[in-house]
Each structure stands twice: as structure tokens, then as C-alpha cells.
Amino acid sequence: MPSWIPANGHALRHAGIHFDAVRITGSLGEQVAYELMQFTDFQAGPIVRSSIGMRSMYFLVPPGTARAYRWPTRVDALTRKGSDFVGVPALHGMTYPLDWRSVPTVQEPFVETALLFELLTKVVAGEIPAVR
């Protein structure tokens, strides 16, 4: 497993060092995570879910890749350029308010940025109907 995943609890990691993060809040984040999981046969790469506030999904993509896209409203690219930090939970144990929607694997250490952007664009455009 990647060294940036803590052994227990959770830890803050500066965006852009080990990964960039794409934060999608609310039901849009849930929908995009669902579509990504379906499309990749549940091998999407790392997606962190926050269960407080706006209930965001953090899609962890390779460092330096998030700024190459023009993300829609309600979507934030967290990169090294800013001072953004992302909470990363341990793989097991008590990690509230964070948990893994999809864990990183050796085969999928990151979410594929281009695929994330493509699916997000289709969901926002209504080309993929909302799951209820």
C-alpha cells in the first residue's frame, strides 16, 4: 500500500505531493463515484468519502494531472499550487468521519483523471441518468 495511507485513524496529506484530489460535493459526488465504480468493475482507484458537512467525495488522481482539466461548478481540483490538504483514512479500524469508497490497489493506485472527467461531464450534462 502507498506510504501516504496511515496505519490507523486518519492523516492530512498536502494535495499535489502524493496525489492531486478532485473534490465533488453532495449527491453529484455520490453519483460520479457510483458511475466510476460501475465503469471500472469496482477497480476505480482511491476515492475517499467524507461523512460530515457537504458529504464530499475526494477522487485521488496522479499528482500534476487535475489542473489539466476545466472542472464544472461544485467541483474543486486540489493541487500543489494551493494550500489544500486532504484527509486520508487508514484502510482498517475507526476512521470516522472519513472512509474509503474505493481503495487504491497495486493495479489502480490512482483514479484515472481523464475517465473521471469524462464521466463527470456526462453526469452533469444529464447523459447518464441519476441513480435513485
Image: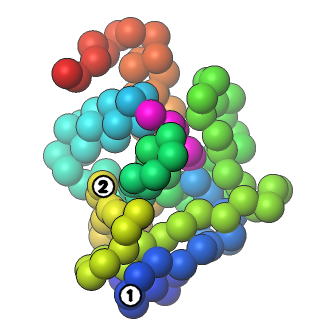
Pointer 1 residue: 8
Image quarter hosting the C terminus: top left
* Residue that appears at 28% across and 33% down: 35
Magenta span: 22-26
Q: Name the foreground residue: 125 vs 40.
A: 125
* Residue that appears at 38% across and 87% down: 8
Q: Compared to 15, does 34 lie above or below?
A: above
Q: Name the foreground residue: 6 vs 19.
A: 6
Q: Tell me the amino acid under the disc marked 1.
A: Asn
Pointer 2 residue: 101
Most extreme residue toward the bottom, as rendered?
A: 7
Q: Is residue 2 visible in this depiction of the protein?
A: no
Image quarter hosting the N terminus: bottom left
Q: Earlier in the sequence, mark 1 or mark 2?
A: 1
Q: Tell me the amino acid under the disc marked 2.
A: Arg
Secondary structure under badge 2?
A: strand
State the predominant SS element of the stretch in magenta.
Answer: strand
Q: Are marks 1 and 2 in contact (CB under 8 Å)?
A: no
Task: Return the x and y of residue 89 as percentages of the image width and height.
Answer: 42, 73
Q: Label 2: few (<14), some or many (≥20) within 10 Å?
A: many
Most extreme residue toward the top, as rendered?
A: 126
